[in-house]
């Protein structure tokens, strides 16, 4: 047993819990609307300012295995619900924090793990019973969704812009699906394009495409075409090139002349064919083998009044084609009118000194068909890269919150109301149990108080006074009472519209419990090959 | 006199025994805490890659990732690997039992009992134990429904010690369904396991088709369905280059005098590709799956003819597809009449989590199926896959053998008593060795209780008394922390796995005991710069 070392199981458990607490102390100050931000300097020297749990955790580069599990946990919550990535870590650490006491009492880790499992099942029940059904009245749906998105955005760096970002997130989702009847949204269909310059409130929703590419300006080609007929081509508009090695042998000047003429004719034939199909916008896929389009071709196309956009990545082909409804064309012989897509306008716009190509699918003057778009693009603006990145992350969270609501149409009060209710109801539940489990469930219930406690602390309130007041309100049966951070008081969360999807909280409880159980069950850290 | 090379070393007699015992017992002790339904997990932290972290309580996985220097420890690791290959489960118990046997042997040697006697005693004891075990086994020759119930119980037992513990009913049913579809074959390659992050374990599911984790090319139809079940869709599985069909003549080069000629060569190249596509489509196919990339031109050719095209399906993907669809993997397309083309009823895109996958339904080999696992983290998914694989392996073995025995320490206690009865009849020193064997078996029950945080001494004593009193199905009720009836608790294991455990552990222990000299050769010298 030369290079392996193994620590005693109790020590391992203690160090694991200690590592979790270390992570907790790093991240808990960023919980809630008055949570602080973290500045992370990454290994590459980049600076990142965020209070998004998942983002901070991802950059932590923790060495300790238990800490790495917590990072995974935060990632999983991000995949599952997209929001509540800080709360899930706080919950899990808080659950682990209760363990040393239980272990000291002589409880076996597997007994604690089983008790936690039982309590989590009960917690799920409690959450379900206290959820409010989503208002399914079609006229109110937009308002309800915006409220939920606002709650999620309120804790971000960009919270003061939630007024603009929340409706955009809601409109983006409801453009590609029907929030009332569908039960899942593919967020890949929402593309977020970031552009530095201007402020966040200039962020806009584009029903079509927008990408940071330049339109060709060779020979004064058109830069704006309305009633566009768009082709996406995957072949090259340049002098022929074979896959096998080839060289053109020229022995005198006449041949050279002929060579140039031939090349021009070759390209001209292709361009004429494009024109003949009625196409007026050409998008060209990037080619790794040679120039995707030659200068001569650009000049010809410009003369024919065809707009050209170059260097589109192959991965984007599917997104572009679905948006404008065209089919990719891989050879000039197949260039026919039925493969073209259509858009209201395709143009080059200049924003903050950056040229962008924008394609708008439908005439904005006409009434827009609802929920029918295949894809949608959000153009995010912000004064610098840090703000821009954070806006992007926050927007993603808001989109995820709406997706959670589409998936499960139920909501919970925010502001720690759900957590304190869980703590109290689980405590009652613990008293109905007998034996060791009762202790475990009690500890589990206790752990949930950390969330409202931290919320209050981060908001600069007296945590003990606030939590006890919250408790007494809930004791009176006001299940909707929560901490209104901005007013610094206990208020009805539903009336104040601090509401979040049930899916976010229930998945956080489930995932946090699962991870806490997993960490508890570890008895040994073995060095492996 | 120095016979060996200068750097070689030798351990003799007592020293060699000592190093055997130390190594083997250290390994067994390390694994001990992972035994049983409430066994603990271990983190395997890799020394080489920073990012690899495994959490497991699968004996074979833990042992295979250890780097050990002790020869006896190596033997035990091999033991667990063999058990993994043979049965797929019981990898922890075999090592723990071998460790217990060696621990007992150490005490016997200290008492001055000669090694050959210990070995003989162990052999006799093992024979007696196996006889008792086989006698107690359930042959399962009743109805198929009863057998399915029994399989379900085995799966429950196997899974109860794994991470899937929480939803074990669900997964046990899934594993039984999957194995019964195999129809007696033990080829687990027919059961594909796909892991997808997100949701929880309960959202995992069994799909009666084949799922390929790839994308359908742009522009192709995304949902194909056979109109008439008699005429299924035809799927061609290929491994051929569909990028630029290169003229593979080394150093070949074309010399031309102008762009027209160059264009002619280029269009000839394109024609070749078009021909190739045409030849492929001569197979009268609805779907073309290639291991390599399919470039834009070929993609368009297929799309134009309404043929679904799937590129970059990698080795594993096409091999499984060819197995499942009963197709050849083709690389040449000149003889459509000879080629075996796969068939299925429907090919369409499905969404799992945030990803799109391709599903082949109504495949001819009805044995095939896919299990999609969902879970919160990568570690969880990996461990779930290992656990499910164990369950599938045991079940497929049981479908072949059909004999089952009881778990929950019941079989161990039964064997322990049988061995000790047999020992009482011996008049020579083997009696003591057999007694130790019996004790080693009892120790397994002890470890089971200890891992569950129960009062091991009391429970093992009670279990012993119950068995001695004729209650042959008595076992440890881990959940309630008392002695119960293993049959009523439904804790059943495959007989083959238990037999294998006793046999190979005994064999390994007695093999190690026989060693009285460890010679470590001088490491081969590496030349500089290698």
Image: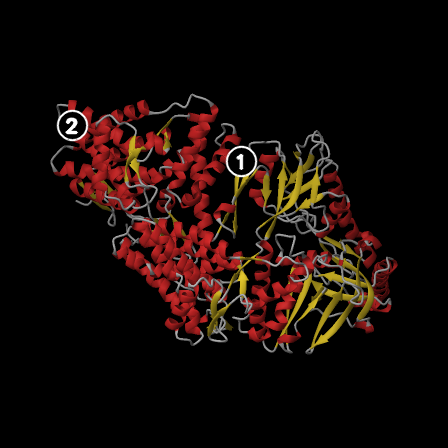
Q: Residue at x 30, y 29 (%)?
A: B473
Q: Are marks 1 and 2 on the same chain?
A: yes
Mark 2, chain letter?
Answer: B
* Residue B277 falls in image quadrant: top right
* Residue A62 falls in image quadrant: bottom left
- Relative to residue B34, is residue B261 drawn left or right? right
> Which of the image's four quarters has the N terminus of chain B?
top left
Res A226 seen here: yes
Frontmost residue, B509 versus B229: B229
- Relative to residue A106, is residue B427 drawn left or right? left
Up the image or down, B287 lies above or below A24; here it is above
Which residue does the numbered mark 1 point to in the structure image?
B190
Give the crowd class for mark 2: few <14, some 14-19, many >=20 residues within 10 Å.
Answer: many
Tag on residue B388? none
Which residue does the numbered mark 2 point to in the structure image?
B431
Percent x, y for residue A482? 47, 67
């Amino acid at each position: 047993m030369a290079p392996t070392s193994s620590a005693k199981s109790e020590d391992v458990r203690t160090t694991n819990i200690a590592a979790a607490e270390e992570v907790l102390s790093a991240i808990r100050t960023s919980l809630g609307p008055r949570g602080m931000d973290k500045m992370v300097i990454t290994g590459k020297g980049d600076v990142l300012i965020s209070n998004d749990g998942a983002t901070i955790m991802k950059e932590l580069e923790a060495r300790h295995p238990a800490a790495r599990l917590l990072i995974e946990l935060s990632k999983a919550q991000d995949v599952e619900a997209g929001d509540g990535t800080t709360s899930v870590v706080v919950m899990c650490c808080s659950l682990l924090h209760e363990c040393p006491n239980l272990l000291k009492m002589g409880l076996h880790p597997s007994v604690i793990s089983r008790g936690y499992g039982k309590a989590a099942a009960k917690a799920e029940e409690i959450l379900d019973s206290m959820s409010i059904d989503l208002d399914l009245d079609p006229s109110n749906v937009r308002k309800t969704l915006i409220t939920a998105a606002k709650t999620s955005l309120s804790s971000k760096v960009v919270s003061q812009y939630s007024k603009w970002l929340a409706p955009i997130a809601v409109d983006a989702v409801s453009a590609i699906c029907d929030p009332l009847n569908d039960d899942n949204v593919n967020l890949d269909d929402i593309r977020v394009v970031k552009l530095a310059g201007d402020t966040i409130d200039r962020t806009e929703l584009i029903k079509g495409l927008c990408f940071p590419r330049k339109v060709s300006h060779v020979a004064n080609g058109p830069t704006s075409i309305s009633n566009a007929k768009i082709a996406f081509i995957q072949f090259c508009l340049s002098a022929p090139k074979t896959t096998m090695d080839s060289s053109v042998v020229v022995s005198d000047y006449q041949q050279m002349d002929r060579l140039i003429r031939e090349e021009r004719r070759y390209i001209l034939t292709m361009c004429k064919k494009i024109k003949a199909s009625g196409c007026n916008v050409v998008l060209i896929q990037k080619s790794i083998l040679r120039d995707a389009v030659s200068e001569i071709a650009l000049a010809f196309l410009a003369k024919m009044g065809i707009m050209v956009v170059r260097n589109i990545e192959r991965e984007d082909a599917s997104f572009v084609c679905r948006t404008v409804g065209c089919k990719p064309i891989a050879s000039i012989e197949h260039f026919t009118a039925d493969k073209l897509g259509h858009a209201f306008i395709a143009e080059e716009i200049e924003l903050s000194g950056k040229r962008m190509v924008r394609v708008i699918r439908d005439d904005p003057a006409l009434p827009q068909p609802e929920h029918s778009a295949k894809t949608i693009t959000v153009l995010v603006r912000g004064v610098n890269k840090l703000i821009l990145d954070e806006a992007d992350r926050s927007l993603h969270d808001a989109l995820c919150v709406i997706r959670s609501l589409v998936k499960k149409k139920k909501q919970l009060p925010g502001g720690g109301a759900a957590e304190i209710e869980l703590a109290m109801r689980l405590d009652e539940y613990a008293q109905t149990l007998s034996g060791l489990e009762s202790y475990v469930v009690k500890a589990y219930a206790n752990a949930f108080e950390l969330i409202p406690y931290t919320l209050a602390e981060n908001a600069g309130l007296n945590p003990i006074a606030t939590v006890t007041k919250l408790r007494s309100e809930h004791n009176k049966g006001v299940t909707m009472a929560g901490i209104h951070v901005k007013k610094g008081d206990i208020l009805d969360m539903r009336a104040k519209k601090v509401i979040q999807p049930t899916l976010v909280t229930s998945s956080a409880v489930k995932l946090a419990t699962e991870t806490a159980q997993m960490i508890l069950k570890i008895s040994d850290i073995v060095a492996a090959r | 006199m120095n016979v060996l090379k200068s750097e070689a070393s030798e351990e003799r007699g007592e020293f060699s025994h000592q190093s055997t015992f130390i190594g083997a017992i250290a390994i067994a002790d390390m694994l001990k805490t992972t035994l049983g339904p409430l066994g603990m997990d271990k983190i395997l932290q890799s020394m080489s890659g920073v990012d690899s972290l495994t959490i497991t309580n699968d004996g074979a996985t833990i042992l295979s990732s250890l780097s050990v220097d002790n020869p006896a420890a190596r033997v035990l690791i091999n033991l667990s690997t063999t058990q993994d290959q043979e049965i797929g489960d019981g990898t922890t118990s075999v090592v723990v039992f071998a460790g217990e046997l060696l621990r007992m042997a150490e005490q016997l040697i200290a008492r001055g009992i000669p090694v050959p006697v210990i070995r003989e005693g162990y052999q006799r004891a093992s024979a007696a134990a196996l006889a008792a075990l086989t006698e107690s086994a359930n042959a399962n020759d009743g109805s198929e429904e009863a057998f399915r119930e029994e399989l379900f119980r085995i799966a429950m037992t196997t899974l109860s010690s794994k991470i899937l513990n929480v939803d074990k009913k669900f997964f046990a049913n899934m594993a039984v369904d999957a194995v019964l579809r195999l129809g007696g074959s033990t080829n687990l390659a027919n059961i594909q396991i796909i892991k997808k992050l997100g949701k929880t374990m309960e959202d995992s599911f069994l799909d009666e088709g084949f799922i390929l984790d790839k994308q359908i090319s742009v522009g192709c139809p995304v949902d194909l369905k056979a109109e008439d079940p008699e005429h299924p869709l035809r799927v061609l599985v290929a491994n051929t280059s569909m990028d630029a069909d290169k003229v593979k003549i080394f150093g070949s080069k074309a010399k031309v005098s102008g762009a027209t000629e160059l264009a002619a060569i280029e269009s000839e190249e394109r024609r070749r590709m078009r021909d190739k596509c045409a030849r492929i489509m001569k197979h009268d196919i609805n779907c073309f799956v290639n291991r390599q990339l399919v470039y834009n031109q070929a993609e368009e050719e297929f799309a134009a003819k309404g043929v679904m095209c799937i590129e970059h399906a990698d080795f594993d993907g096409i091999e499984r597809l060819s197995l499942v669809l009963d197709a050849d993997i083709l690389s040449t397309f000149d003889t459509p009449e000879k080629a075996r083309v796969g068939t299925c009823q429907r090919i369409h895109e499905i969404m799992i989590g945030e990803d799109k996958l391709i599903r082949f339904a109504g495949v001819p080999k009805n044995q095939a199926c896919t299990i999609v696992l969902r879970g919160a983290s990568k570690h969880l998914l990996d461990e779930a896959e290992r656990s499910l694989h164990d369950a599938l392996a045991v079940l497929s073995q049981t479908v072949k053998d059909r004999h089952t025995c009881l778990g929950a320490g019941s079989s161990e206690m039964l064997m322990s008593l049988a061995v000790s009865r047999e020992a009482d009849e011996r008049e020579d020193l083997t009696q003591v060795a057999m007694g130790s064997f019996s004790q080693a078996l009892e120790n397994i029950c002890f470890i089971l209780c200890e891992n569950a945080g129960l009062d091991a001494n009391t429970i093992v004593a009670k279990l012993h008394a119950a068995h001695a009193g004729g209650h042959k199905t008595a076992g440890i009720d881990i959940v309630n922390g008392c002695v119960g009836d293993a049959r009523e608790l439904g804790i059943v294991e495959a007989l083959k796995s238990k037999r294998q455990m006793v046999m190979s552990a005994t064999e390994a222990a007695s093999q190690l005991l026989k060693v009285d000299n460890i010679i470590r050769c001088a490491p081969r010298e590496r030349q500089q710069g290698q």
